[in-house]
């Protein structure tokens, strides 16, 4: 009968807005805690390096082998440029080499004949020397013609435009059939590691420090949907110059995923530190829409109305910020 009366008394007390303190209830002493304030801002995905794949010769683009978004490796052929004049020059070089070969054969024959006559005493040494000189001239001319042909062949091979590094193709600003000059870009390749670039208000300049940890938001979420943590990063660099009232900082992320270059995502960064009072969530009660906390006083337990702030972590434990109603050192009764 006595337990039933005790339970009935508890129900009546709760219904009246009062709380019966359990004999086994514990106490929580309110202590000031210094927490880091986080601010959600947008970070833009950038690539450390963006290299252009440039044409090495002038001519007409005969084929393009990559499209935007394609993954390429260094040395892959991304496009081919053809110069019709190179084929004509190559034919002219072959004809010149053939003519020089004929001259060289004739000079070799003249030299051999002169040496034979000299051995028989029927020719002077000067004739042998002249034949030897002509043979050397023809030999050197043939070597020069072969080198010129190698240059033309190398120019022909340089019609293949190669990827400058491993990465993802961002843009292909030309089309097959376009006429381009040597040095013009045919594709842009994002070859460096992706990172996030932040642009923060000037008032946060003294609070942003290199090496600070930041939280990376879930891809596709906006400020209206709230911040949803998906990963962590580190502030790698804070630029010393303020541009248009904005502080520029770079955030390194170990595995940023498959973001697009220039895509924006939310980043929660530490901007300030402040001291606050907090209690465990179980210490709070709501009576008629008002938040109450039970505090142990010299006269016994006392219900105090409090104004709440946000949630935070204290040594890994959840806490609710108390804006007013409690003071440091108060003993809060926990159920």
Image (cartoon, rainbow, N blue to C red):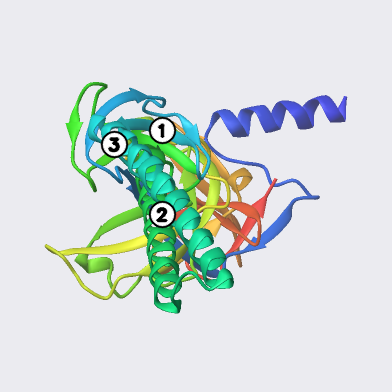
> In the displayed image of the protein, which residue is found farthest to the right?
1
Q: Earlier in the sequence, mark 3 or mark 1?
A: 1
Spatial CA distance of label 3 from label 1 is 21 Å
**Percent position of residue 50, x then y:** 35, 49
Report the mark closest to the observer, 2 or 1.
2
Residue holding disc 2 = 142
Q: Is residue 234 left or right of residue 142?
A: right
Task: Label 1, secondary structure: give it.
Answer: strand
Number of numbered discs overlaid on the protein picture: 3
> Residue drawn at (60%, 47%), measured in percent from left and top?
283
- Could you tell me if the residues under marks 3 and 2 are in contact, i.e. CB atoms within 8 Å? no
Residue holding disc 3 = 86
Q: Quadrant of the N terminus?
A: top right
**Percent position of residue 37, x then y:** 41, 60
Report the mark closest to the observer, 3 or 1.
3
Q: Earlier in the sequence, mark 2 or mark 1?
A: 1
Residue 78's disc is 1
Q: Nearer the viewer, residue 317 or 159?
A: 159
Q: Nearer the viewer, residue 159 or 210?
A: 159
> Residue drawn at (62%, 28%), measured in percent from left and top?
12
Residue 7 in view here: yes
Spatial CA distance of label 3 from label 2 is 20 Å
Task: Tell me where residue 184 sits by quadrant.
Answer: top left
> Residue drawn at (11%, 62%), measured in percent from left and top?
244
Q: In this picture, is 180 found above or below 331?
A: above
Q: Earlier in the sequence, mark 3 or mark 2?
A: 3
**Percent position of residue 16, x then y:** 53, 32
> Residue drawn at (38%, 25%), measured in percent from left and top?
67
Residue 129's disc is none
């Amino acid at each position: 009968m006595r337990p039933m009366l005790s339970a009935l008394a508890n129900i009546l007390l709760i219904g009246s807005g009062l709380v019966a303190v359990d004999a086994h209830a514990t106490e929580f002493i309110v202590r000031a805690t210094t927490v880091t304030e986080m601010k959600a801002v947008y970070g833009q995905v950038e690539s450390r390096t963006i290299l252009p794949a440039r044409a090495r010769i002038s001519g007409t683009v005969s084929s393009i082998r990559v499209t935007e978004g394609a993954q390429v490796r260094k040395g892959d052929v991304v496009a081919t440029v053809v110069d019709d004049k190179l084929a004509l020059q190559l034919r002219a070089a072959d004809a010149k080499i053939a003519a020089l070969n004929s001259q060289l054969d004739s000079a070799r024959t003249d030299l051999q004949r002169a040496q034979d006559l000299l051995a028989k005493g029927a020719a002077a040494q000067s004739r042998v020397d002249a034949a030897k000189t002509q043979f050397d001239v023809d030999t050197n001319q043939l070597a020069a013609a072969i080198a010129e042909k190698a240059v033309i062949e190398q120019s022909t091979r340089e019609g293949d435009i190669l990827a400058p590094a491993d990465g993802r193709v961002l843009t292909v600003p030309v089309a097959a059939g376009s006429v381009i000059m040597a040095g013009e870009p045919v594709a842009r390749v994002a070859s460096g590691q992706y990172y996030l670039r932040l642009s923060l208000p000037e008032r946060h300049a003294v609070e942003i420090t290199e090496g600070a940890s930041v939280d990376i938001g879930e891809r596709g979420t906006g400020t209206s949907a709230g911040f949803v943590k998906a990963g962590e990063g580190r502030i790698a660099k804070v630029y010393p110059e303020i541009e248009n009232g904005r502080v520029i900082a770079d955030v390194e992320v170990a595995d940023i995923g498959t973001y697009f270059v220039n895509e924006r995502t939310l980043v929660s960064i530490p901007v300030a530190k402040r001291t606050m009072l907090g209690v465990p969530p179980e210490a709070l009660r709501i009576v008629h829409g008002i938040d109450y906390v039970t505090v142990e006083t010299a006269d016994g337990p006392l219900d105090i109305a409090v104004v709440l702030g946000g949630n935070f972590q204290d040594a890994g434990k959840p806490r609710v910020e108390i804006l007013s109603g409690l003071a440091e050192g108060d003993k809060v009764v926990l159920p």
